[in-house]
Image (cartoon, rainbow, N blue to C red):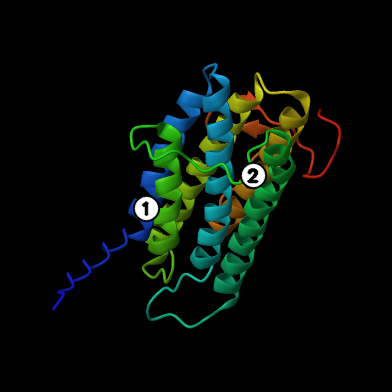
């Protein structure tokens, strides 16, 4: 008779705000790593990791958009929050689409992140996957909700900074794709800022790096 070992329980998801802060920390580490010149294989792996991160954060934001504040009925303000965060989710997924052609051009279709737990890009991928679970059925006070969104804004700015670093030594087609990603992420920041009730962010500047960002929308062929 063969015996089966019990399947260990899945780890409990992080609280929403903690997941967002862990995401921001991982995005900052990746941005610093990607700001330095990388060998070709690591640059290609970073592009694949960026793609996975953008996709997972687009999925995660869909969950965040339906945040429930206990004891309060649905009201116009809650619907506006959902609308703005859903818009941010679409821009994240649009940024992911911007990299489709880049991955094909670089020969990276099916090229997944290597299982190196110490690599900043791999840690960013894990943090992005973790917030999918942390934001699946989010609930809590409006203060906790807004703190989560503001940490997500910080993380988004740092993901954008990482894309900017990867574009520095990239071939022209890859450079154009990454600039489209950066423009999409500026729109994410604007949508999330509106969700948190903050003044609109300047889409021409990444506040986390104080470096200018292009203001063009995804799919354009020119780079400003």
Give how far across and how far down residue 83 sits, in percent. Answer: 64, 67
Q: Earlier in the sequence, mark 1 or mark 2?
A: 1
Instruction: In the displayed orientation, state which residue is furthest to the front.
Output: 1
Give the secondary structure at mark 2: loop
Residue 203 visible in the picture? no
Query: In the image shown, does 31 or 177 lie closer to the viewer?
Result: 177
Instruction: In the displayed orientation, state which residue is furthest to the right.
Output: 221
Left or right of 57 in this view: 201: right
Image position of 3 with respect to 151: above or below? below
Give how far across and how far down residue 80 sits, in percent. Answer: 61, 68
Give the secondary structure at mark 1: helix
User: Which quadrant of the structure image shows residue 76?
Assistant: bottom right
Query: Mark on residue 19?
Result: 1
Task: Measure the C-alpha gap from mark 1 to mark 2.
Answer: 29 Å
Quadrant housing the N terminus: bottom left
Left or right of 14 in this view: 197: right
């Amino acid at each position: 008779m063969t015996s089966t070992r019990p399947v260990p329980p899945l780890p409990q998801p992080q609280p929403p705000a903690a997941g967002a802060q862990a995401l921001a920390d991982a995005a900052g580490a990746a941005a610093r790593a990607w700001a330095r010149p990388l060998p070709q294989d690591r640059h290609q792996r970073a592009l694949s990791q960026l793609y996975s991160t953008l996709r997972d954060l687009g999925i995660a934001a869909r969950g965040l958009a339906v945040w429930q504040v206990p004891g309060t009925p649905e009201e116009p303000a809650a619907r506006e929050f959902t609308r703005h965060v859903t818009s941010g989710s679409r821009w994240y997924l649009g940024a992911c689409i911007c990299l489709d052609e880049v991955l094909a051009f670089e020969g990276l279709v099916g090229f997944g992140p290597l299982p190196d737990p110490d690599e900043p890009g791999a840690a960013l991928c894990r943090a992005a996957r973790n917030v999918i679970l942390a934001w699946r059925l989010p609930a809590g006070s409006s203060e906790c909700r807004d703190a989560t969104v503001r940490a997500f804004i910080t993380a988004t700015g740092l993901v954008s900074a990482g894309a900017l670093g990867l574009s520095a030594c990239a071939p022209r087609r890859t450079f154009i794709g990454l600039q489209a990603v950066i423009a999409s992420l500026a729109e994410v920041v604007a949508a999330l800022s509106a969700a948190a009730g903050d003044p609109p962010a300047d889409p021409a500047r990444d506040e986390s790096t104080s470096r200018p960002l292009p203001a063009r929308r995804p799919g354009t062929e020119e780079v400003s």
